[in-house]
């Protein structure tokens, strides 16, 4: 695992503060987001911003389908059994 490669995924870690590269250690308050998360959130707000599991309209259905697809990906990633899929919660 190359920490320099991982660091490239976090755009904010490319800035300088007081003429030195940013080192961010306040993860208890806020964690910095990798570009993949920033892009996924941007995609959500641009293309299907709606309540999940609460609407019958098209955007809500798309948001719900994508939400459940991620739950399935996480289930597979952690090798959880099918019935544990619904125990995976997002905050």
Image (cartoon, rainbow, N blue to C red):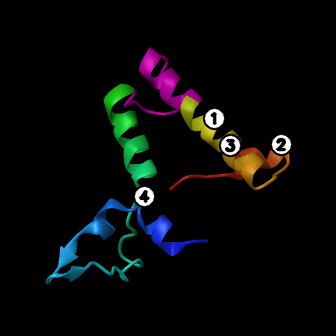
Q: Which residue is mark 3?
A: 73
Looking at the image, which residue is at 46% across and 24% down? 60
Q: Which residue is mark 1?
A: 69
Q: Which residue is mark 4?
A: 34
x, y percent for residue 67:
56, 37
- Residue 23's label in the rendered image is none
Dot 2 falls on a residue whose secondary structure is: helix
* Mark 3 nearby-residue class (10 Å; few <14, some 14–19, many ≥20): few
Image depth: mark 2 or mark 4 in front = 4
The residue range painted magenta reads 48-65
Looking at the image, which residue is at 55% across and 72% down? 2
* Mark 4 nearby-residue class (10 Å; few <14, some 14–19, many ≥20): some
Q: CA distance from mark 1 to mark 4?
A: 20 Å
Q: Is residue 53 magenta?
A: yes
* Mark 1 nearby-residue class (10 Å; few <14, some 14–19, many ≥20): few
Q: Which residue is mark 2?
A: 82
């Amino acid at each position: 695992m190359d920490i320099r490669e991982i660091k490239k995924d976090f755009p904010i870690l490319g800035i300088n503060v007081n003429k030195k590269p940013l080192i961010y250690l306040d993860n208890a308050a806020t964690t910095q987001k990798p570009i993949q998360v920033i892009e996924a959130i941007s995609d959500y707000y641009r293309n299907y911003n709606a309540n999940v599991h609460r609407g019958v309209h098209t955007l809500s259905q798309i948001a719900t389908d994508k939400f459940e697809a991620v739950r399935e990906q996480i289930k597979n990633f952690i090798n959880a059994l099918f019935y544990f899929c619904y125990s995976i919660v997002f905050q």
